Image (tube, rainbow, N blue to C red):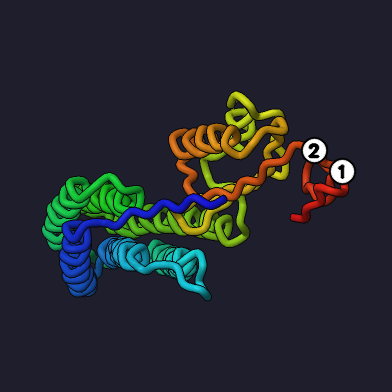
Amino acid sequence: MHVHGSHSPGEKTSRVLRISLVVTLAYIVLLVVAGIRAHSLALLSEAGHNLSDFFALMLSLFAVYLESRPPSSTKTYGYHRAGVLAALVNAVSLVAVSFLIFYEAFRRMRNPGEVHAKVMIIVAAAGVLMNGVIALFLYRAGRDVNIRSAFLHEIGDTVSTAAVIAGGWAILATGQFWIDSALSLAIGVLILWSGFGIVRETLNILLEGTPRGVRLERVETAIRAIDGVNDVHDLHVWSIGSETRALSCHISIADIPPSASERILREVKECLHHDFRIDHTTIQFEHVICEVAHGCVIPVAEEQGHSH
């Protein structure tokens, strides 16, 4: 018994993501040029941070496209895992970028060079405005989790860019150029933290681990609480894609006709949807006692034999 949930994002969401990609790429170019001219590692680090946002937006747009592609006979789950693999590659590259920033920051802290703080402040101010506008557009585009993740990336970028402004003012006030390298270290830590978080989540999906935020014990308790359910075992919950959760389990019920068991199935599916956002389910009903409660293979009553 299978339940499939699909949500097709509107054209408005795709348009907002495409515009955000173009604007972000233009700002990355501005940061690189200004960073080189101002000798500011903080601006160059911010370019790396914005590059991570560019990839995040691109992955969100890619996910929107993938969601529109139906499953096929060879890709029965569709193409959800393609977005997960792309996110993993993106995250690994972010980790590499952060270590390059650390290397250059420590090198410059030993021999600080002159930094044009005014250029830092002007470019960073433009970044705060740009990231703020993009975050507003994403917020209005929809509350899909995929879009919310891109929105949070932009909020983080706005905060880090505001820190560059503060650093520029500090350099103007004190004349201490090492502040620029210290800011780049902080930005590098933020990139590294984000990168490791994505790596951990994507690996959990690829290894079919329990989705983040889902406790298997709570799922089992919720199913057992439904009237007519005698036992739950061989319970598995995993992610097909970043936002597509699946479940399979065996549910023991009384020896009742299918018309009566339909009510139990409907309530189980409603519970899983509303409480755990699980829409793809494979549920096997049985009324015999399993020889192995967890990892069920052979029932005691051989005439009702099943395999899993």
**Relative to 212, is 90 on the left or the right?**
left
**Relative to 122, is 167 on the left or the right?**
right
Amino acid bearing label 1: Ala
Q: CA distance from mark 2 to mark 1?
A: 7 Å
Amino acid bearing label 2: Val
In this rendered view, identify the residue nearer to me: 64 or 301: 301
Q: Position of residue 121 (x, y in %)?
A: 15, 56
Q: Residues within 10 Å of mark 2 (few under 14, many from 20)?
A: some
Q: Element under label 2? A: loop
**Relative to 297, is 85 on the left or the right?**
left
Write down the residue under mark 2.
288
Q: Position of residue 60 (x, y in %)?
A: 32, 61
Q: Element under label 1? A: loop
In this rendered view, identify the residue nearer to me: 74 or 150: 74
In this rendered view, identify the residue nearer to me: 114 or 261: 261
Quadrant holding the C terminus: bottom right
Sequence order check, earlier mark of 2 and 1: 2
Write down the residue under mark 1.
301
Q: Position of residue 135 (x, y in %)?
A: 20, 50
Q: Marks 1 and 2: in contact by CB < 8 Å? A: yes
Q: Position of residue 19 (x, y in %)?
A: 16, 65
Residue drawn at (51%, 74%) of the image: 73
